[in-house]
Image: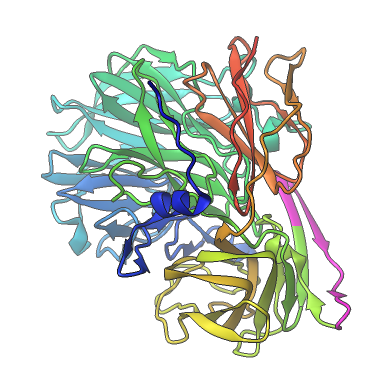
Amino acid sequence: MQRKFKLSSCFILFFLFSFSISGQEVVPQTYCNPLDIDYTYMVYNSSRNISYRSGADPAVIEFRGEYYMFVTRSFGYWHSFDLVHWDFIKPEQWFFEGCNAPTAFNYKDSLVYFAGDPAGYGSILYTDDPKSGKWTPTASISNNIQDSELFIDDDGKTYLYWGSSNVHPIRVKMLNKDDRFLETGVKKDLINLVEEEHGWERFGENNFHPTLKEGYMEGASMTKHDGKYYLQYAAPGTQFNVYADGVYIGENPLGPFEYMKSNPMSFNPGGFTNGAGHGITVKQTNGQYWHFATMALASNAQWERRLCMFPTYFDKDGLMYSNSDYGDYPRFGPDNPTKAGEHCGWMLLSYKGAVTVSSSLKQIMKFTSNNDEVEVHELPVEKNEKGEITASVLTDENPKTFWVGEANNDQQWIQIEMLHPGMVYAFQLNFHDYESGIYTRVEGLRHRFVLEVSEDGRNWRTAVDRSKSYKDAPNAYIVLNQPVKAKFVRYKNIKVPGNNFAMSELRVFGLGLGNKPNIVEGFQVKREADRRDASLSWNAVEGAQGYNIRWGIAPDKMYHSWQVYEADELFMRCLDRDTRYYFSIEAFNENGISGKTEAMEID
């Protein structure tokens, strides 16, 4: 006999997110994409006086129970004990231009090997103490180490995978680890894009470009699991919302490799910050896998990027997949025993909230999806009925829109009146680099500010005080010790890096006090004549902020999702031509997520 229980929303909230000790709620460890680290200002494009931070192409390894993250052109790397909090290490010996598309490998907890010279050739470095920042170069010069992956198998045989091209394939060559990493002579082509079959490999935003037909294949990475070799690769381009990592599976490091039917493995095309490509999969000390990847910001420049982290799994059929549902919402931290990396249930309270600001030098919308075409629209300054300057770009969930204050001082502020009151658990502050004038790694940068909350817009209390902080946090994610009820949020600037205080989005997360949306009705999926394309439509749900579409190759393998706001249709070009899919949809708002529709089979 099966018993059914009706649980109140308060009890469900209590059970899912916390437990109480003496009336105090225990807020779980969470993280939020893009990751909250002190991204480096890029030397790339500095000759054109284009200043911006970026983080891309992460190589993350576990070494003696701790973690190290290497990132393109960062002039160093990061260290962490828990995969959430990262501290920068400035190495004593390094490539003069930083590093480009780095690779790193932990060999049996004895040595860390690293390569990533921007010139495409150089020595492979090694150390037995990466925390010290001291590295030693091998006494040889290796070619073709750009966009590479160094992989040492259990038997000590060493492989270097590489490739970054819209024409050439991913290749592999064998090296001799015990003889200065010299090539052994074994070299072969492995895989290439097959765009006529794989829609997600097509170049362009939403896998469409008016002129270029070939996507880029790059960012090789290798994971060995249960005796099989999972060769990962990125496509179709780092600046696009559909940047993703796919997988070929083989029985040998040299192949042959077979395309994985549930591809792509890491995919995050919708939401605030898009993309999840050119990454690496690392195994946590407790056995949980994580995929670190690159997200596209592409506001100041095509190569303006951020990092993300998603939990990764291998199903009973050996298929590799990651969980990127609500990819830029707060997620349970790696210390959670059962739900690590899953969306923790906190929703977006600030979406479409009414924003007023202290001043407005500029409000900008950019579109940078094509290589040589960058559209810039300066939006007119608008005021509300009280004569206050408004800035709706700060709550529109678009990283390519931003607001610039007239100065960078303690007279600048942002205030949001959210559409509905709610319990606030966390904030994410996405600062923007507007003509910052910084072109390399600079120490001593800091973000100083105060965050206040109010229920009525008149009586305020301090929620976060970083007025004396020494933390550099361009994508600051801040979780409150205790949730607070609020309808208004106010950011008060003290000082941030750059010439002007600028921000692209001020996001407030928590739980609303109303009802979650009803289940979506009228969901339809039409496969187009080009079977890589599909048209989706549904009936709008009253009170919904947006919708999350899920799909996959079986009802129990719906590993992909696409989050959209205020839409009742979606045209996707990311399907594999010869694959049958199942689709489902759910609605969401600040109060929660509706039930899913029944999985619909689409031939």
Name the residue nearer the viewer: 153 or 185. 153
What residue is drawn where x is 65% and y is 60%? Answer: 300
In the shown orientation, is residue 387 left or right of residue 117? right
What residue is drawn where x is 67% and y is 44%? Answer: 517
- Measured as percent of width and height from the top left, residue 122 is found at 32, 45
Res 145 visible: no
Look at the picture and state if 259 lies above or below 124.
above
Name the residue nearer the viewer: 127 or 118. 127
- Measured as percent of width and height from the top left, residue 345 is found at 49, 49
Name the residue nearer the viewer: 172 or 375. 375
Name the residue nearer the viewer: 391 or 510. 510
Quarter that holds the C terminus = top right
In the shown orientation, is residue 384 left or right of residue 285? right
What residue is drawn where x is 39% and y is 20%? Answer: 319
The image quarter containing residue 215 is top right
> In the image, which residues are magenta?
366-386
- Measured as percent of width and height from the top left, residue 224 is found at 27, 26
User: Is 353 contained in the magenta span?
Assistant: no
The image quarter containing residue 382 is bottom right
Res 194 visible: yes
